[in-house]
Amino acid sequence: MKRRIGLWVLAGFAVACFWVIFSLIIPRGVNFGYWPITSITAPASLLRHRPVTWYEFIALNAAIYGLAGLAMEPFRRLWRPRLR
């Protein structure tokens, strides 16, 4: 269980790193925080009430993915076929 949640955190970290690198590559005038794909894959981009640094963004996204993995773990156990 801990390994799977750790993989969720790692996935959130990877997605956030991708968006940080992508934001450094695109021109300054483009606001990718309003793109629907960004809102779905990086929920930390929805925090618009204060500026978030890139390392806070990565940590928040990893934490959100970890919480999503923690919430999905009981359902995964229910959906998994039982082996005897």
Image (cartoon, rainbow, N blue to C red):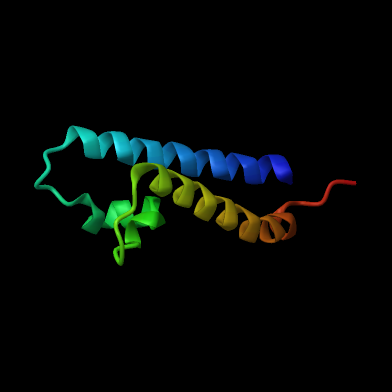
Quadrant in which residue 6 is drawn = top right
Residue lying farthest to the right in this orientation: 84
- Left-right relation of 36 to 10: left
- Left-right relation of 25 to 78: left
Residue lying farthest to the left in this orientation: 29
The total of numbered circles placed on residues is 0
Is 46 drawn above or below residue 58 in the view shown? below
- Left-right relation of 8 to 41: right
Q: Which residue is drawn at 46% across and 52% down?
A: 60
Quadrant in which residue 27 is drawn = top left
What x and y, as percent, mark residue 77? Answer: 74, 55
What x and y, as percent, mark residue 66? Answer: 58, 51
- Residue in the foreground of this view, choosing between 31 and 54: 54
- Residue in the foreground of this view, choosing between 63 and 70: 63
Q: Which residue is drawn at 40% across and 57% down?
A: 43
What x and y, as percent, mark residue 5? Answer: 64, 46
Q: Which residue is drawn at 38% across and 51% down?
A: 42
What x and y, as percent, mark residue 19? Answer: 32, 41
- Left-right relation of 27 to 32: left
